[in-house]
Image (cartoon, helix red, strand yellow):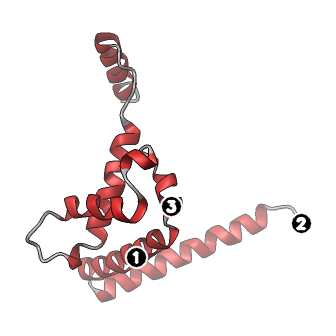
Amino acid sequence: MAFIVPGYVALRGAASGDWTTGLRYRAYTAFAQGEGVAFAYRSAGARDFYREGEEATARLYGTRRENENSIVRAVRNNPGAYAARLWQNAKVGAYHFMTTYGEGFAAALLLFALRGVYALVREKQKRSPPR
């Protein structure tokens, strides 16, 4: 399984002479479309929210060309907009989590997750040398 992607890149590179993976381009596309997904509630549904996300990303963070397909550079251009996007994703994620699992089961899962974090922190404290 670990040879699939490198094998594909090697075969494609040998056949075409192009050794790039296109990962930066595809990652930036996902970043831009994610803006539309996060704020899909704003669109009336008449248009494609992926395309709207790409348009909003160009307005908020600069164009793909200006950012040279760099997500980090785009976020540096407007960290406030990215913070708003993270907050929106957290709210939407929490809503979907609660509606998917139901309030009772979701609360139980959250308690188990918090218990796991607590156990990890305690274990780390036990293993770290005293100061």
Q: Residue 59 in the image: state x and y as whole percent.
A: 35, 64
Position of 126 with respect to 74 (left or right) is right
- Dot 2: within a 10 Å radius of its alpha carbon, few (fewer than 14), some, or many (20 or more) residues? few
Position of 79 with respect to 28 (left or right) is right
Q: Residue furthest right?
A: 131
Residue beneath the point at 47% across and 77% down: 112
Q: Residue 19 in the image: state x and y as whole percent.
A: 39, 21
Judging from the image, what secondary structure is the residue with disc 2 in? loop
Viewer-nearest of discs 2 and 3 = 3
Judging from the image, what secondary structure is the residue with disc 1 in? helix
Q: In the picture shown, does residue 102 fall above or below 21?
A: below
Viewer-nearest of discs 1 and 3 = 3
User: Which residue is denoted by mark 3 in the rendering?
Assistant: 77
Viewer-nearest of discs 1 and 2 = 1
Position of 7 with respect to 50 (left or right) is right
Residue beneath the point at 24% across and 82% down: 99
User: Which residue is denoted by mark 1 in the rendering?
Assistant: 90
Identify the image quadrant of the C terminus. Answer: bottom right
Residue beneath the point at 32% across and 22% down: 8
Q: Quadrant of residue 23?
A: top left
Identify the image quadrant of the N terminus. Answer: top left
User: Which residue is denoted by mark 2 in the rendering?
Assistant: 130
Q: Quadrant of residue 96?
A: bottom left
Q: Mark 2 or 3 closer to N-term?
A: 3
CA gap, disc 1 and disc 3: 22 Å
Residue beneath the point at 44% across and 80% down: 110
Q: In the image, what residue type sits under mark 3?
A: Asn
Compare residues 11 and 76 and report the one nearer the observer. 76
